Amino acid sequence: MPATTRIAVLADIHHGPDLPTKRGSAALPLLERFSAFVAETAPDLVLELGDRISDEAPDVDRRRMAEVADALRALPVPVVSVCGNHDLVHLPAEENGALLGQPMRHRTVELEGLLVVLWQAEARLRPERGFALAEGDLAWLEATLAAADRPVLLASHLPLSGQAQTGNHYFENQPELAGYAEQPAIRRVLDRCPVPILAVAGHVHWNSVTLVDGIAHLTVQSLTETFTTSPEPAAAMALLELGQQARLQVVGNDPFACTLPFAGPRRRWLAPLVPEPARAPAAAADGVAEASRPPASLRLSS
Ligand SMILES: [Fe+2]
């Protein structure tokens, strides 16, 4: 029976202006509440999943990022972060890292019985291409997972599951912007992971569980999002406990909880059926997804 690791999770802080579906002005007070949540739950680690600010302009972004960084650095446990798309519009990853006191590159954190993989895959939105991995992103992930000697928690800003966006305020009508164009290739890398793995992400501003071929993908609601809790912010703060099982509990105005198998053997699923007429060009499934790109008119505010 492995030790249980407790990780407090915070997603999409979006410190910034109040927007139609974000209470950006509540971010700093809610970070004070998160500090109390950390004191109550005594996690081993805090995982912050990116989109710390809603970008406006370089100077104001820098000031807001520093305010969030001050709040995170005041927490009494180690904090690890990844960058979200809004963090990188006006501030390079290096400046995010300097303010946070963390290296903002791919890295791992070894905990007893758990390897936390911080996958800093390219998170800048390219208006004509959507989200696409940078050179080396996938190779680093594949090599890191292949060498893992204990169960893995894989953290990224964008979800890696290819989950449906039905009902999502931001993404139902532009699902291409909810994940990477290379999602099929990412899935193949995760499929080859030799140890138990659970993925956790932000970006889509809702709580969710998506199971793909025996791998669980979690997303955690944003701290200041209002689309599921209007007019109040979701105030989402999560505790993820990873041992033989994975237990996620999200508190706030959009509460959520789930318990899943984690550290035992992975139960693979039978491959999806291919409908008869589609069998001849079977390889097209990956090709279509990898070639799809959102039109330039699509815009992202999550
Ligand atoms: Fe976001």
Image (tube, helix red, strand yellow):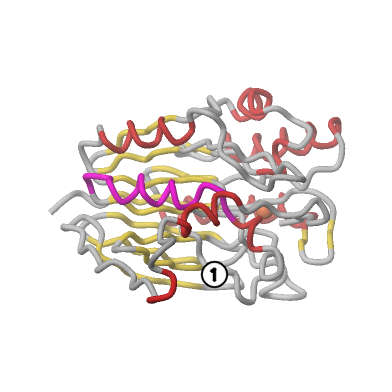
Q: Quadrant of the N terminus?
A: bottom left
**Along the line of sight, the residue nearer the viewer: 173 or 75:** 173
Whether residue 291 is visible, yes or no, is: yes
Magenta residues, as a range? Answer: 179-195
Against 106, is 115 above or below? below
Which residue is at a point 20% across and 64% down the rendered structure image?
267
Which residue is at a point 60% across and 42% down the rendered structure image?
132
Which residue is at a point 31% across and 39% down the rendered structure image?
115
**Coordinates of residue 274 in the picture (x, y in percent):** 37, 71
**Coordinates of residue 166 in the picture (x, y in percent):** 60, 75
Q: Is residue 129 magenta?
A: no
Against 94, is 82 above or below? below
**Coordinates of residue 125 in the picture (x, y in percent):** 70, 43
Which residue is at a point 44% across and 67% down the rendered structure image?
209
**Coordinates of residue 59 in the picture (x, y in percent):** 86, 30
Kind of residue sitting beneath label 1: Ala
Residue located farthest toward the left when viewing the structure as drawn: 1
Q: Quadrant of the C terminus?
A: bottom right
Whether residue 35 is visible, yes or no, is: no
Rendering quarter of residue 116? top left
Q: Is residue 194 magenta?
A: yes
Rendering quarter of residue 295? bottom right
Q: Residue at label 1?
A: 164
